[in-house]
Image (cartoon, grey):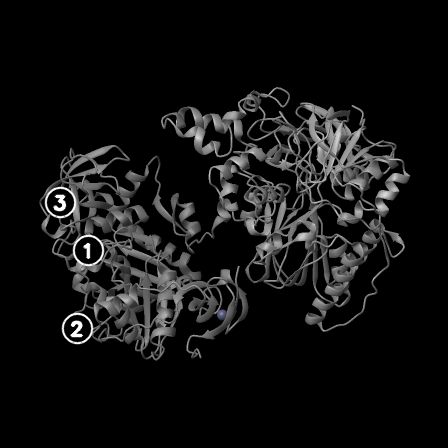
Amino acid sequence: MLYINCPHCGMRSQNEFSYGGDASVKRPELNKEVSDQEWDNFVYNRKSLRGKHLELWQHISGCRQWIKVERDTATHEIFRTFKADEEVA
Amino acid sequence: MTQAFRIENGGLINRDKKLSFKFNGKTYFGYEGDTLASALLANGVHLVGRSFKYHRPRGFFGAGVDEPYAVVQLYRNGETEPNIKATEQELFDGLEAKSVNCWPSVNFDIGAINNFLKIFLPAGFYYKTFMWPKSFWYRIYEPFIRKAAGLGVASTKHDKERYEHKYEYCDLLIAGSGPSGLAGAYAAAKNGAKVILAEDKPRFGGSLLTSDVNIGNQSGKDWAEGIIAELKTMPNVVVKNRSQIFGYYDHNMLVMSEKVSDHLPSTKKYHPNKRLWYIRAKEVLISSGSIERPIVFGNNDTPGVMLSSAAKEYLKVYGVLVGRKPLVFTNNDSGYETAIEFKKHGVDPVVLDSRKNPESEIIDEAKNLGINIKNSYVVVAAQGYKKVKSADIASISEDKKQLGKIENIQCDCICVSGFWTPTIHLASQSGNKTKFKEEIDAFVPGQSKQNEITLGAANGVFSLEETLKTSFTAGSELSKKITENDNKVAIPNVVEKKSSQHDKFWCVPLPKGKNYKRFLDFQNDVAVSDVEIALREGYRSIEHVKRYTTLGMATDQGKTSNLNGLQLVSEIENKVVPAVGHTTFRPPYTPVSIGAIVGREVGKHSKPTRKSPMHSWHEKNNAVFVDAGVWLRPRYYKRGNENLFEGSKREAKNVRTNVGVCDVTTLGKIDIKGPDAAELLNRVYTNAWLKLPVGKARYGVMLREDGIVMDDGTTTRISENHYHMTTTTAQAANVLSHLEYYLQLVWPELNVNVVSTTEQWAGAAIAGPKSRDLLQKLFPNSDVSNEGLPFMGYMEGDLFGVKARIFRISFSGELAYEVNVESDYGNFMWEKIMEIGEEFKIQPYGTEALSTLRIEMGHVAGSELDGRTIPFDNALEGLVSKKKDFIGKRSLQRSAFIAEDRQRIVGVVPLDKQTSIPEGSHLVKDDKAPLPNPKLGHISASCWSVEYDNPFSLAILKDGKNMIGQKLFAMSPLKNKVIPVEIVSSHYVDPKGERVRS
Ligand SMILES: [Zn+2]
């Protein structure tokens, strides 16, 4: 079970969180003309990276905040975590 | 029965407490502190089971966790548990056990015929022999395999025992209480670290219990006892015996199974049977020791052949002689230690050493005691069927290829030592890439992967002095990092005998003309010849060889067989062992009871049970409950002998004619506040929300980004910046997360807060033509007329002093209202409604009547919003705004979603107006068409229409828009039904929706 550092609550076990997928995906702006390809990329197409991956988790049984977690998908090593509005450098 | 093989004195058992037990129906006696294995051996019982494949007689091979044979069915306190290792089961008074794998009995076993048919059961026999003809599989092969090849029998009864889970955090977790674990624990504890020390056996001390060493001028055993006693007094230390750490998971999470009650005749009151510990450790010290390796020779599975370390443990810990004429067969000095122990107890062993001229302190001691030692000698084959009677022995050439003349010597047990294999399972599970250590012919942990360190024998270090030194140091260093204390602990003096180099020899060649089975894996009956066949047939990867031959796949997970298997593959393949590699170690290290894994989450505790504030009223009024997610909801209120069909029909009819009340507390409720609340709703729902006035409710549908309907419900504007959203019972949690996702990540600029208020409000739906009359009496000071509170209107009211929210919304399609009060007043509200409603012939109605009412109205619910439908499919396209953008809108342009013949909701009526259509039935054009019969749609929900008094169903049907009036067939192969049906509008009752507005 992973041990995730919630930027709001501190170190918590994985079973308090739910996974939210790739954090680098940006939703196209509302009311903007979007091509089929762009929309498909947003809704469906994911890279399924091996290695360092920035992903979303929600601290669902804690503060209910969505957070960003930089994790190695092969080793499960967690490098850094960020608040939702924090820029990832 | 006398315990003929128990020595007069000695051992760590309690001779004052005699225990009676039964094995295969026969009564024996043992002592407190025995294991089932030691007690049986004390009584001279060596035959305990039959092997998995050939059903050959099997005895005891080890004395602990590594035991491959002695797996029994245990009976305790009216319960039975399969696959218990007799070497791990502590004896208690009244214990009963039986052999497994034998039928009809351990002494006469039908399956042993396999032994004579073994030519037909080579490697991969599961894949080959039983493959053809196909029809034989079910009738002959499978039943045969099940009968002959199973291990124990699982109980089919409910398990009365209780199992607990515990979460723990510590600075240093130590796996194993041998010299390394004790030293590490002691040093770290002295530095104030929070330490957990786990030992799988009942006694602490590991190898110190059986080895002839001195630490700090005491015997190893006494030193261990002193350390444990001191650790137990320290508040920062937890020491746990009977506790096996079986899994090393990510981020230093380890899981330990503590056997709390297995050693007792029955579990004490308020005690669990087992306790599963989830331990998050800052640092882990793996001091799991090592397991002795067998040497492979002919018939090496005969009862009486066992590890030399096990023979020593039976003698030193349990005071049991495993034989009176022992033969010790060794390639290293450990065998001599066992021989010396035998000799000290008046038994004359013969030692066969594969080495030519070994010299060491231990060997000198053996020689001085006058032990008969034969160098360059090996056991070629054990003789005897149910017990070793003699051994064929021979001298062996220096290259270990040529055997000398075969001699036969009498013996009643053969104690084997092929050197030691470090127990690296936990290190490997942590992700540590292990490395092969040439000097010991075994793998040891490599670079640490997580915060783990492996020391002592588990790290391939067999010198006690070095083990203590490194472990004391590690305990100090690891704890210093955490506690910043630096209390020095003096490392005690060690007296131990130096040993000489072991012989890299593991398998005795077959003598000419002999075809003995030489077993590698004792539990799964994998012999040298099986691995040879696998390699001949082209299997190369060790992972493939393992699966094809089943080497190392039994419940002992190859603890004694892995390395010899690798040696064999490397020899045939002409590769070095590290190039062959080993198979992956996966948790659990030892089998763990399913009950322990499940813990207390069984039966009604398998999930939380949510009840509405009116639950006790429902119970008192004969409600029959149904699970709705984790909620319990009344399905109908039983009157007399009514069944579900009759009761729900009565309730639904009463709503259509008078008035009914339904508990709708379970609906998800979300409070939405903030200046941008309307904007959020406008983006989340498909319809327009910016112009909803205060005091009005609106029905909305929300999509996922892929255009599929996520949920529906009404949202009410309570005040300028305050909305009350309702969701379906099932989707409440998902919708909240969905809103939080968009507010926190996608549109953080929106100034809105959302919070779940599901549990804050109790809800009652009051529905039926007389509902307004009732409402007026409930709220005499409010104007609830059609003008005062029109359809989709909202007002606050005073329910006899209790603040209430009144919504004029309808799911039943009748004139209807929903009243919400704070949860604590729920029961008060409900009783008032029932009391005042009496004059209007009110009846409570449950979910079944609720479904009936919504189905015949064509209102969609979870069975239509099933994660596969878009708004059009549910006839909800009128709610999809063309003007504004919203979540999922872009997806609605996908070609499949705008296809001319897109699926759509329809009503379905059986032509005979009698036969109810099972939910899930498929709609087809031709009921006689060959399979697979093209499916046009499926029945999503069925009811008995109380309006028309005939069955009615909803269906999602391909090109449903143009199918009205068509005749089709509803087919349910599950229920074996074919029903001719007519397709009608989904709005079966009141298609214009006049009633809700009346
Ligand atoms: Zn948090």
Label ID, residue B592:
none
Residues at circles 2 and 3 in contact by the CB criterion of under 8 Å: no
> Which element is circle 1 on?
helix
Label ID, residue B873:
1
Q: Quadrant of the N terminus of chain B?
A: top right
- In this view of the protein, which residue sits in the foreground, B555 or B761? B555
Q: Is residue B679 visible?
A: yes
> Which element is circle 3 on?
strand
- In this view of the protein, which residue sits in the foreground, B374 or B254? B374
Residues at circles 2 and 1 in contact by the CB criterion of under 8 Å: no
At a point 38% along the width and 70% down the height, the residue shown is B740
Q: Report the amino acid beneath label 3.
A: Ile
At a point 61% along the width and 45% down the height, the residue shown is B590
* Horizontal relation, residue B661 to residue B93: left or right: left
Q: CA distance from mark 2 to mark 3?
A: 34 Å
At a point 80% along the width and 37% down the height, the residue shown is B315
Does residue A34 sit above or below B206 in this rendering? below
Q: Quadrant of residue B698?
A: bottom left
Residues at circles 1 and 3 in contact by the CB criterion of under 8 Å: no
Q: Quadrant of residue B12?
A: top right
Percent position (x, y) of residue B308? 75, 38
Percent position (x, y) of residue B513? 62, 24
Label ID, residue B983:
3
Q: Report the amino acid beneath label 2.
A: Lys
Q: Earlier in the sequence, mark 2 or mark 3?
A: 2
* Same chain? Circles 2 and 3: yes
Q: Which residue is mark 2?
A: B883
Q: Earlier in the sequence, mark 1 or mark 3?
A: 1
User: Tag 2, which chain?
Assistant: B
